[in-house]
Amino acid sequence: MARAHWSNCITHLDAEVVDFVGSYFGEEGRSCLLVAAAGFDPRSQTIAKMLSETLGDRLSALFIREERGGPDADLQDQADANETALRGIVRRCSVESVDIFGDDGAAIGGSRVASMLAEYEIDPKTTDIVLDMSALSIGIGFPVAKMLLLDCEQIVGRSLHILIVSNPELDDRISSEPAERAMPVKGFSGIGQLPQTLDPARIWIPQLAKGRKAALTTISLAIGDCYKICPVLPFPARDPRRADALIGEYENELVNEWQVDPRDIVYVSERNPLDSYRTISTLKERYDRTMEGTYEPHMILSPIGSKVMAAGALMAAIEHDLTVHYIETARYGFDGPPMSDKDPPDLMVHVLLSGPAYGDYGAITVLEAE
């Protein structure tokens, strides 16, 4: 379903986010549900604190704790500490544990969180839902976002917000051990893109991130032969040489394995999710137009790394029914000492996905059975 309002979506950055939260949620008629992660990430508490200070008892929360077998003891302790703190920050809250892997090692987190959210009763008086994607994995955050968007587009007067606390330098210090198998994210298989009569032409759009070569290699093998590969790099970025560093890190993959034409490299802002959304949407329209009558374009996204860039990919995937191919993380690691005041500050992003500000745009298709 077309969402023309997303082309000029209401967004706020950094200090604007604080001002928006204070003025918008400061209205007495606002009642908000926060959906966020309760994991080890040091950014887990930021949005909850900001909303709680403004809303008080008008804030409720659903915190999702992603459970992976054999976590690092220090990270487990940090997750426990964050959960305890979050329970104190938001008095009306629940914490739900979601197993990311089944007994056979298969990634089931998306299906588990979809079932959990389907049974969760949202207070009918809720005027706003905030999805804090700062510390949620793509395999959990994307299905939750799609289901919450469906809810908000069906209920008159209810708005859906995405809030993200981003810190690219911190992201670089969080290492991950990928699982063995890559697969589409729950609700993002892109069934509507499957070829009908013409031969398919796969266009893979992987988001490059530091230390994620093993994950992207596994995803590449799962996808198979591609008509085009368009790697996504962060530019503009807080570190103006971040894109250059990633090109150096992925040189072998770009040149030898994926054989990427330099003209197909995509640059999107590290700060503004709408840049990612608009760029992917433009690519979709361009390939649809140039391949018409010859091939059936099948665009596949693999957002790994920056959650701000991933939020734009999420919007494009929902808008155009694109496949999101992803590989779950089996184990996380955190390199180096704890963050200090000397480290670069966190960045904040707010995106208003739906609500009365845009009028009535109807509902999206319910998550397909997979």
Image: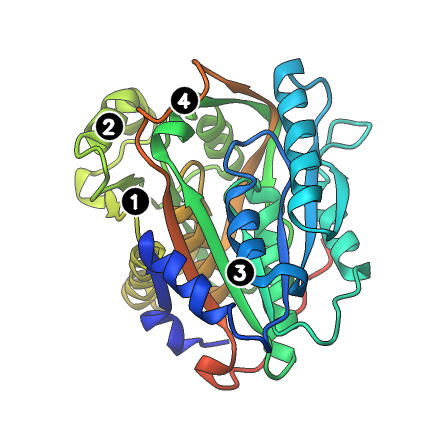
Disc nearer the start of the sequence (3/2) = 3
Residue nearer the viewer, 326 or 229: 326
Report crowding for label 1: few under 14, some 14 to 19, many 20 or more residues within 10 A (C-alpha). many
Residue that carries the numbered disc 1 in the rendered image: 270
Q: Which tag, 1 or 2, sits closer to the chain's start?
A: 2
Instruction: Check disc 3: other Cα within 10 Å, few if <14, some if 14-19, many if 20+.
Output: some
Q: Is residue 240 left or right of residue 317?
A: left
Q: Nearer the viewer, mark 4 or mark 1?
A: 1
Residue at 29 percent of width and 56 percent of height: 275
Return the disc, 1 or 3, that comes first in the chain's sequence: 3
Q: Amino acid at mark 3?
A: Thr
Q: Nearer the viewer, residue 346 or 113?
A: 346
Give the alpha-carbon distance from disc 1 to disc 2, as whole Å: 16 Å
Q: Is residue 137 shown above or below 145? A: above
Which residue bears the numbered disc 4? 211
- Residue 54's tag is 3
Packing grade of label 2 (10 A; few <14, some 14-19, many >=20) is some
Callout 1, which amino acid? Glu
Say which residue label 2 marks. 247
Residue nearest the observer in this picture, 91 or 223: 91
- Is 49 located above or below residue 171 in the figure? below
Query: In terms of secondary structure, where does tag 3 sit?
Result: helix
Q: SS at mark 1?
A: loop
Q: CA distance from mark 1 to mark 3?
A: 28 Å
